[in-house]
């Protein structure tokens, strides 16, 4: 059962959601974002951006980083940085992959050619205010910043 | 996500999506969309009741658009909300699938 595979934990400065690397776990994200939204007064636009960015990043980790191997952990941390500003940090244990280094293919080639790659990165950049990648001892860490100007 | 199909006057096929066009939503409609994209020439995608559009849903729309246009047809999107529209424009998909907020204009664009 899906609810047994994920953990949601609140500590002093951050909220955590641990997923097991399977596509079915993506269904848990919207509910977690709703919970965060209520706790931290996150505006609707930012909620949408968080849902979008997480779906993109998590599906890439599961399908490519983990090559669809189930039961590989993905840790998502939410930090309210200051008023109107927050951070989602995603940690995986996959081989090195910097999603920000991927080529952002020009839109015309994206749509008329056979390659649809780069679409996800374009969306990530459009819906976040900051993107930072670092390699960790265990895997990869992507930090996505969201600022909601009043 | 639910998908409904309605044949309109002027040989326009209206596809109505209702729900979240996330990965699960895209998977739920993929097959039916392929059938529409492979058989219909004038397609209007009604997105008024789409609460979320992610990159997988975007790919479903792009795939359908390529198929329809490749066969000399026309395709357009009607009524996306603000964030859904932002996904379509930020990705550049609106260049392939024009967005309309007025129903009559949307229909006219396919004639």
Image (cartoon, coloured by chain):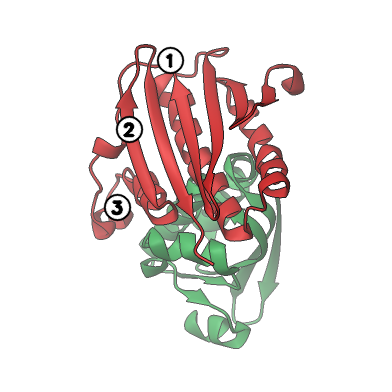
- The residue that label 1 is drawn on is A93
Circle 3/circle 2 CB separation < 8 Å: no
Q: Name the residue at 39% across, 12% down.
A: A138
In the drawing, does residue B26 fall left or right of residue A107? right
- The residue that label 2 is drawn on is A133
Same chain check for tags 1 and 2: yes
- The residue that label 3 is drawn on is A110
Residue A120: in sight, yes or no? Answer: yes
In the drawing, does residue A24 fall left or right of residue B95? right
Q: Colour of chain A?
A: red
Q: Nearer the viewer, mark 3 or mark 2?
A: 2
Q: Nearer the viewer, mark 3 or mark 1?
A: 1
**SS category of the residue bearing label 3:** helix
**What is the distance, in whole Å, between disc 3 and disc 1 at their CAs?**
30 Å
Q: Chain of mark 1?
A: A
Q: Colour of chain B?
A: green
The answer to which quarter of the image holds residue B81 is bottom right
Q: Name the residue at 62% across, 27% down.
A: A17
Q: Chain of mark 2?
A: A
The answer to which quarter of the image holds residue B25 is top right
- Quick one: A141 or B2, which is closer to the camera? A141
In the drawing, does residue A86 fall left or right of residue A102? right
Q: Chain of mark 3?
A: A
Q: Residues within 10 Å of mark 1 (few under 14, many from 20)?
A: some
The label on residue B89 is none
**SS category of the residue bearing label 2:** strand
| Above or below for B61 versus A90 | below
| Above or below for A114 versus B46 | above
Q: Nearer the viewer, mark 1 or mark 2?
A: 2
| Above or below for B12 versus A84 | below
Q: Earlier in the sequence, mark 1 or mark 2?
A: 1
């Amino acid at each position: 059962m899906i609810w047994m595979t994920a953990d949601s934990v609140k500590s002093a400065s951050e909220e955590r959601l641990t997923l097991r690397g399977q596509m079915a776990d993506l269904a848990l994200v919207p509910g977690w974002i709703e919970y965060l939204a209520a706790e931290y007064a996150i505006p609707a636009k930012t909620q949408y951006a968080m849902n979008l960015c997480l779906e993109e990043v998590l599906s890439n980790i599961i399908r490519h980083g983990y090559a669809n191997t189930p039961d590989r952990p993905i840790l998502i941390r939410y930090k309210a940085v200051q008023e109107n500003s927050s951070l989602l940090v995603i940690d995986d244990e996959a081989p090195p992959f910097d999603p920000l280094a991927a080529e952002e293919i020009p839109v015309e080639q994206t749509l008329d050619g056979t390659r649809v790659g780069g679409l996800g990165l374009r969306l990530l950049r459009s819906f976040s205010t900051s993107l930072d990648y670092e390699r960790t001892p265990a895997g990869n860490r992507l930090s996505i910043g969201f600022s909601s100007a009043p | 996500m639910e998908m409904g199909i309605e044949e309109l006057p002027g040989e326009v096929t209206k596809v109505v999506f209702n729900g979240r066009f996330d990965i699960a939503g895209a998977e739920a409609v993929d097959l039916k969309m392929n059938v529409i994209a492979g058989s219909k020439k004038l397609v209007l995608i009604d997105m008024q009741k789409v609460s979320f559009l992610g990159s997988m849903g975007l790919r479903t729309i792009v795939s359908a658009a390529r198929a329809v246009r490749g066969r000399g047809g026309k395709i357009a999107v009607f009524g996306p909300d603000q964030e859904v529209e932002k996904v379509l424009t930020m990705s550049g998909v609106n260049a392939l699938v024009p967005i309309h907020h007025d129903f009559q204009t949307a229909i006219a664009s396919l004639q």
